[in-house]
Amino acid sequence: MLINSVILVLREVLEAALLISVLLALSVRLRLSLSWLLWALPATAIAVTLFAGFLDVMTDAFDGAGQELASALLQAAVFLSLAGIVYFCSCRQRQASSPALPLALLMSLAATCALTREVSEVLIYVAGFAASPDHRTAVFAGGAIGAGIGISMGVLLYAGLRALRFLPFLNVCYVLLALIGAGMVMQSTMLLEQVDWMPVGQQLWDSSALVGEQSLTGQLLYAVFGYEATPSVVQGGIYLFCLATIAAAWALPGLSDRTGVLDDAS
Amino acid sequence: MSVLRLFTACLLLMPLAAQAKAPVIEIEIRNHLFQPEEVLIPAHTKVKLVVYNRDKTPEEFESYELNREKVIMGGRKANIFIGPLEPGVYPFFGEFNPKTAQGRVVAQ
């Protein structure tokens, strides 16, 4: 029971911890106020209470597809926020006076949406066992250890990122945000397949013999890249589309700079 | 803008394109066990699993092989579409009680 709880909570916490670490490191390096985290925490608490409290009603909505639709929406919101964050960071990197408010709002939104689903699941799990005296201690202890490991990995990533020089730091952050964002969208496509809102495409490959999804490496890769051992062609396409979208968000401010220079020259 | 429009159109059309009648198979969760543990389904066919959680506690239906995960609150049911699958064995488990809640889908 203890090990199960460690793994379950770690799985849920890891992805959000890595994402929030990248956002925190970006904020500090780009001299943004960390107030977005203060907005995100109460917003998450409210969203989690609603999500976990109404999960059974939500599950039955939309002919049984409500839970998946809500989760997919949250994940899509994280992706769009991340694309916006990359765009505004890229602006700020070129012009320190560019507005900080959109960044703070988007970071808050990304953190809230990323945390809501994960924390709700942990809450439902822990609350489910809170009434059982046989399992309660193991679930609480395991959950605390799992959360501790997840948060520690986030702290490690944060420290690693802070150790980089400015430009490589920014590029690594953008790549991480692109991978995490694309991974989230890929997970949401799976949820939509699960409720038959999206056709199941042909399998692209099967790497389960190489890296099993349940292995520690698989879990880590899942948290960062949204790793799937057996992705479908549709998922692969959507993943690449998402990476391209974030790359475009990164390149856009640079392009408009260049056009500006050309306009001046003519 | 046209890309956005196309994307929205695809999103709206997806459910219509995907939702065809699929055979329904029922599974129960009782005392943290799946009943039946083994579910036989036809290969190359989309199937709708209806999982009833007869326990008071929540459970999460999870399968790495089927790429499926869904929380089912106590006393509730969940619909989960799987397939079309190649012939083979696809294990699933209850993530909240993985020691006891184990099952498999056999596509043949």
Image: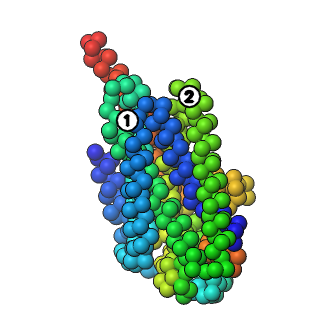
Query: Could you tell me the amino acid type at mark 1?
Result: Phe
* Image quadrant in which you'd find residue B59: bottom right
Quadrant the C terminus of chain A occupies: top left
Q: Which residue is mark 2?
A: A168
Both labels 1 and 2 in a single chain: yes
Instruction: Residue A196 in the image: state x and y as whole percent.
Output: 45, 71
The numbered mark at residue A88 is 1
Quadrant the N terminus of chain A occupies: bottom right
The numbered mark at residue A185 is none
Q: How many marks?
A: 2
Q: Earlier in the sequence, mark 1 or mark 2?
A: 1
A157 left or right, relative to A91: right
Residue A55, above or below A173: below
| Residue at the image position 39 percent from the left and 68 percent from the top | A50
Q: Is residue A76 visible?
A: no
Along the line of sight, the residue nearer the viewer: A1 or B104: A1
| Residue at the image position 39 percent from the left and 45 percent from the top | A36
Residue A181, above or below B74: above
Report how far apart the C-alphas of labels 1 and 2 lie in the structure.
18 Å
